Amino acid sequence: MNEKFFGFIHKHPVWTILFSLLLAFAAAGGAQKLSFKSDYRIFFSEDDPQLVAYESMQKIYNKSDNVSFIVVPENGDVFTAKHLAALKELTKQSWQVPYSTRVDSLTNFQHTYAEEDDMIVGDLVSQPQGLGAADLARIKQIALNEPLLLNKTISQKGHVSVVNVAVNLPGIDPGAEIPEVAAFVRNIKDEFLAKNPGTQVYLSGMVMMNNAFAEAAMDDGATLIPMMFLTVVVIMGLLLRTISGTVATVIIILLSIGASMGLAGWLGFFLTGPSASAPTIILTLAVADCIHILSSMFYEMRHGASKRDAIASSLKLNLQPIFLTSLTTAMGFLSMNFSEMPPYRDLGNIVAMGCGFAFIFSVTLFPALLSVLPIKVAPRKAGQNDKMAVMADFVIKRRKLLLPLVSVAVICSTLFIPQNEINDDFVKYFDERVPFRTSTDFMQKNLSGMTLLEMSVKSGTANGINDPAYLKTVSDMADWLRLQPEVDHVNTLTDTLKRLNKNMHGDDSSWYKLPQTREMAAQYLLLYEMSLPYGLDLNDQLNVDKSSTKLVVTFKNLTSNELIAVGDRIDDWFAQNGANYALDLASPSLMFAHIGQRSIVSMLTSTLVALLFISVLLGFALKSWRFGLISLLPNLLPAAVAFGVWGVVDGQFGGSAAVVFGMTLGIVVDDTVHFLSKYLHARRNRNADAKAAVHYAFGNVGSALWITTLVLVAGFTVLAQSSFKLNADMGLLTAITIFIALVIDFLLLPPVLMALDKKDMKQSAQDQNSVDAQPAIA
């Protein structure tokens, strides 16, 4: 059946080409349906417990999506009339941001003070142009002593301030809404800088982070894919020295990428930061199939076969290995469906589709193109030896040294795996080239960061927040939080109530404490709320029936484990001191922290599932459960060694690195399958002993293995240049794993095979000695 199939391709290459192009273009037509989603919520399943808790809190209180203008005055002093006037204008302009619902800044902070029997509520800075030295000193003194402002809106040194814009996106078309807001605030920034030369402005906040996801993906698409194409062309041109083969390979790559991305569009997928890297991965995987076919074809042609016979022989020899490697690679990527992050499930599914298309085009369109394109290969001269033969001789000769030496190196490397720490800091999803990362790092260093915890304290009864016992519990919690070394700022309603109580007692500082009765607390809040201007109410801190209030805690930059530990400490404190009330914790920071923890469980699950399927498949394909079990050794060790190396080099990984184990398992199987299939072919069909079989495997597939490894390592190294750190870490860790896989397949697998076939080798040696002895006996 294979001969009929390949005979049809050779007899009708034009029809084969036309049919393949028709299939590719029909699938690629769905690419126009692909759209990009940049909301950070895409990293979580709809039933994710932390996301559900956060969304529930967002419904109770105002949404906390925001844009932050971090403003640095030229002279390093916020409290000058000129700079305060500029901040006042920036605050006014910020109300024009699309979908904005609230703007908070130093200038419009609702300061309260007593004037005879009246309580005055108004902007902290109302007329900045006429401020004198005494007025500026008073404003500075108020700002740097107000707990609601310090370390959140104004730095302790008074050299940096923030204008925070709360944004309530409709969510109808996030792909258009987020860029709209980002473009508008950037325009405001440019106009502000033009009017205030010397001033610096950084943009941060959740909206800018969402926008950074989309921009990082588009930047990668514009740079990494062209870079990878250039890498493939250069490598194939230099190593295989074939223009026609390179051209045919590039066609296979383009069609595989177009068909898989188009099919993803037809199936309703959408693009995200991780899934946008699919073309780069498909590109590297599609090259491998073509290189194996070309290498075997060149091997036959160098030994005198015609091009037609060489193509037929190459396809006959490589069909099963390429099918197996495509299937196992697809299985590895499909195992990403166990990931806690939906974008990585999409990435795995898209790449798996790409593996399928690459296989189809490699065994149909690729040989048809090779049939019609001119290809010449110089025959090998008698006695000429190649580098793979030298490599085989070295491995066979040094097998007794390589087996223990490489084994010890592998074991030592795996000892460093515990050095790795899980850390999903969403700010560090971007490298320093991304403006959002630069801005947020500056804000964390000079003011406070984006690591937040939102806490809803529920009294259980309407107007329960006015109960003095409830207020004391909330106040005690805020005081306890401020004593924690990780905390930068705590925003709580009890600070406002203490200030109001002081105001209502003639600004006597001894009355800076909570109201003593429920009625007094209710009256203070009512009076205060009635005095607040539009957009600056307390809806971001109180629910509708005033049964609960929200505290917002800002932390220093914490790892996932540290944030989860802080959350546990808060729960413990509340269990001991607030048992009469209920506490909910939620925030994007907490969501990302927990998903990193769960990724480990998903990684183990996906690896076990992929390992089970691949092991069963190899056992059937190789027609030997013995060799199926042997294949596990070079398939599992590369990822283990790579994680050990990662523990020394980096030591931190998140949800993206957690999927690498299962993903690379499918990729590294390729080398093992090709080497074992050639080894078994020599043993079974050529009656070769173990040494000769290893020599045959190196000679037939060795060059293809190191060339494909070079291409794969180059491809994933290019992906490691991504400004999106999740993709960069995944690319670098995968490249390390694939390189280690080649080392193990070349230096450990052959000695293992020869050691297990020791009896056959001894018998072969005895036969050879008897043959050598015959002339002497005669």
Image (cartoon, rainbow, N blue to C red):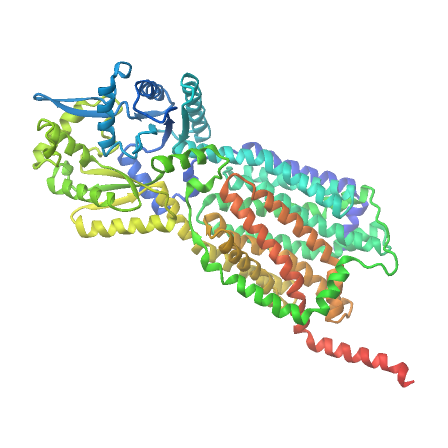
How many numbered circles are shown?
A: 0
**Apparent side of residue 163 relative to residue 308 in the rendered image (left or right):** left
Residue at image position (58%, 54%) is: 737
Residue at image position (67%, 42%) is: 231
Expressed as whole percent of the image width and height from the top left, the position of residue 458 reads: 20, 42
**Apparent side of residue 712 relative to residue 520 in the rendered image (left or right):** right
**Apparent side of residue 676 relative to residue 219 in the rendered image (left or right):** right
Expressed as whole percent of the image width and height from the top left, the position of residue 623 reads: 66, 66
- 627 over 320 or under it: above or below: below
Q: Quadrant of the N terminus?
A: bottom right
**Location of residue 246 (image quadrant):** top right
Residue at image position (56%, 47%) is: 731
Expressed as whole percent of the image width and height from the top left, the position of residue 642 reads: 54, 56
**Location of residue 42 (image quadrant):** top left
Is residue 684 at all visible to an observer of this figure? Answer: no
**Apparent side of residue 564 relative to residue 639 in the rendered image (left or right):** left
Residue at image position (78%, 41%) is: 243
